[in-house]
Image: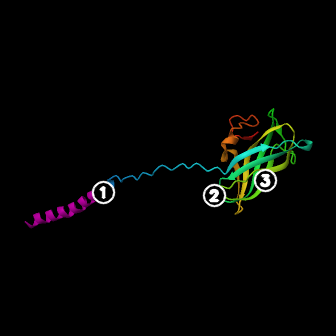
């Protein structure tokens, strides 16, 4: 009987590791639950600037025209300087060159500080254009410098028009563009 007992022992000794390996394999093959990530929230960027009003001035002596812009700071930072890139047009849609540089764009700079949400009031830039046929001007973008000295340039689509300014319509016949216009 002893030989039979030995064979049972060797069968048991062999079976224990095999069963253990099978149990480990079965645990390893179980599908792990997948943690689903919620879809990322799409956050619309806040407008950097909100244009509350803008218009060219009445032509003065020698056909000199000023620019007027009233804006609010839409950022979370205090702005030290704001510089608007503008293009003026005649009633016929022709570009009016800047008086100072002779280029198609005139840069209009104003010093702050402008706290978050603060309005500028009506800011006036004298001697911007020299053409008494100016119908309107458009803001093509703005460079802002905050109080930490960070400089950023924002395109027209990051600048919001108040409903009153938006109602003025297109300037320069640029249909299909995000067009910031004043007439």
Tell me the distance, in whole angstroms, between the alpha carbons under discs 1 and 3.
Answer: 70 Å
Among numbered discs 1 and 3, the one appearing first in the sequence: 1
Q: Which mark is residue 49?
A: none
| Label 3 SS | strand
Among numbered discs 3 and 2, the one appearing first in the sequence: 2
Q: Which residues are magenta?
A: 1-23
Q: Which mark is residue 27?
A: 1
Estimate the x, y position of residue 104 in percent, counting from the top left: 82, 42
Q: Residues within 10 Å of mark 3 (few under 14, many from 20)?
A: some
Estimate the x, y position of residue 72 in percent, counting from the top left: 69, 52
Among numbered discs 1 and 2, the one appearing first in the sequence: 1
Front residue of 55/106: it is: 55
* Residue at (36% x, 53% y) in the render: 33
- Which quadrant of the rendered structure holds the N terminus? bottom left
Q: Would you say 54 lies left or right of 11 here?
A: right
| Label 1 SS | helix
Q: Which residue is mark 3?
A: 109
Q: Are marks 1 and 3 in contact (CB under 8 Å)?
A: no
Residue 13 on the magenta segment: yes
Tell me the distance, in whole angstroms, between the alpha carbons under discs 1 and 2.
Answer: 53 Å
Estimate the x, y position of residue 93 in percent, counting from the top left: 79, 34
Tell me the distance, in whole angstroms, between the alpha carbons under discs 3 and 2.
Answer: 20 Å
Q: Is residue 9 above or below residue 29?
A: below
Please name the colour scheme applied to the rendered image: rainbow
Front residue of 111/13: it is: 111
Q: Residues within 10 Å of mark 2 (few under 14, many from 20)?
A: few
Q: Which residue is mark 2?
A: 76
Estimate the x, y position of residue 90 in percent, counting from the top left: 82, 36
């Amino acid at each position: 009987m002893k030989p039979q007992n030995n064979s049972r022992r060797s069968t048991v000794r062999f079976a224990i590791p095999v069963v253990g390996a099978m149990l480990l394999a079965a645990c390893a093959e179980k599908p792990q639950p997948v943690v689903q990530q919620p879809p990322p929230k799409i956050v619309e960027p806040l407008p950097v600037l909100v244009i509350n009003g803008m218009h060219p001035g009445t032509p003065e002596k020698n056909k000199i025209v000023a620019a007027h812009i009233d804006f609010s700071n839409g950022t979370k930072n205090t702005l030290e300087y704001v510089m608007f890139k503008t293009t003026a047009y005649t009633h016929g849609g022709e570009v009016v060159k800047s008086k100072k540089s002779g280029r198609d764009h005139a840069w209009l700079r104003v010093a702050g500080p402008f706290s978050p949400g603060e309005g500028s009031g009506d800011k006036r830039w004298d001697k911007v254009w020299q053409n008494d046929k100016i119908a309107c001007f458009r803001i093509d973008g703005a460079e802002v410098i905050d109080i930490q000295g960070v400089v950023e340039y924002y395109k027209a689509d990051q600048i919001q028009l108040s409903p009153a300014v938006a109602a003025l319509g297109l300037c320069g016949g640029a249909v299909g563009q995000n067009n910031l216009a004043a007439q």
